[in-house]
Amino acid sequence: MRALGNVEDSLKEQLVRDFKSADISDLDKAILDYAAKLTKEPASISETDVSDFRTKHPELTDHMLHDIVQVVSYFNYVNRLADGLGVELEERFNK
């Protein structure tokens, strides 16, 4: 949970346990839902997912959506690369 930076410990615990019930905005929950789907079921993302996301959250700009997809995709790539090469976390990240 250290990776969450300046986020309060109680919120970190909520986010890790169940982000859907965490004390965050509806937009943040929608972003995390989208990120989870993009991570777990990338081939299932459709134009409908994108249009529904934008319709439900008109404050979401093209730039924001682009950044969300780029960050999620990058971390998925790095994790798969590390897993595929058998890279182990440094001890400080196992706490």
Image (cartoon, grey):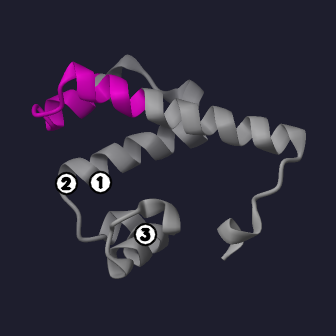
Q: Which residue is mark 2?
A: 26
* Relative image position of residue 24 (x, y in whole percent): 23, 63
Specify which label sits upstream in the sequence, 1 or 3.
3
* Relative image position of residue 19 (x, y in whole percent): 38, 64
Specify which label sits upstream in the sequence, 3 or 2.
3
Q: Which amino acid type is marked by label 2? A: Asp
Vertical side of 94 occupied by 3: above or below:
above
Q: Secondary structure at mark 1?
A: helix
**Which quadrant of the figure has residue 61?**
top left
Left or right position of 53 against 14? left
* Relative image position of residue 55 (x, y in whole percent): 15, 29
Q: Which amino acid type is marked by label 1? A: Lys
Look at the image and give the residue range highlighted in magenta: 51-69
Q: Which residue is mark 1?
A: 29
Left or right position of 51 against 67? left
**Which quadrant of the figure has residue 52?**
top left
Q: Are marks 2 and 1 in contact (CB under 8 Å)?
A: yes
Please report the residue visible at 43 percent of the width from the left and 69 percent of the height from the top: 18
Vertical side of 79 occupied by 90: above or below:
below
Magenta span: predominant SS is helix
Left or right position of 13 against 43? left
- How packed mark 2 is, by other alpha carbons closer than 10 Å (few <14, some 14-19, many 20 or more), is few
In the image, residue 58 lies in the stretch drawn in magenta: yes
Please report the residue visible at 43 percent of the width from the left and 21 percent of the height from the top: 46
Q: Which residue is mark 3?
A: 18
> Alpha carbon of mark 3 to alpha carbon of mark 2: how far?
14 Å
Quadrant where the image shows the C terminus: bottom right
Q: Secondary structure at mark 3?
A: helix
> In the image as oriented, which residue stretches furthest toward the bottom?
10
* Relative image position of residue 25 (x, y in whole percent): 18, 58
Q: Which amino acid type is marked by label 3? A: Asp
- How packed mark 1 is, by other alpha carbons closer than 10 Å (few <14, some 14-19, many 20 or more), is some
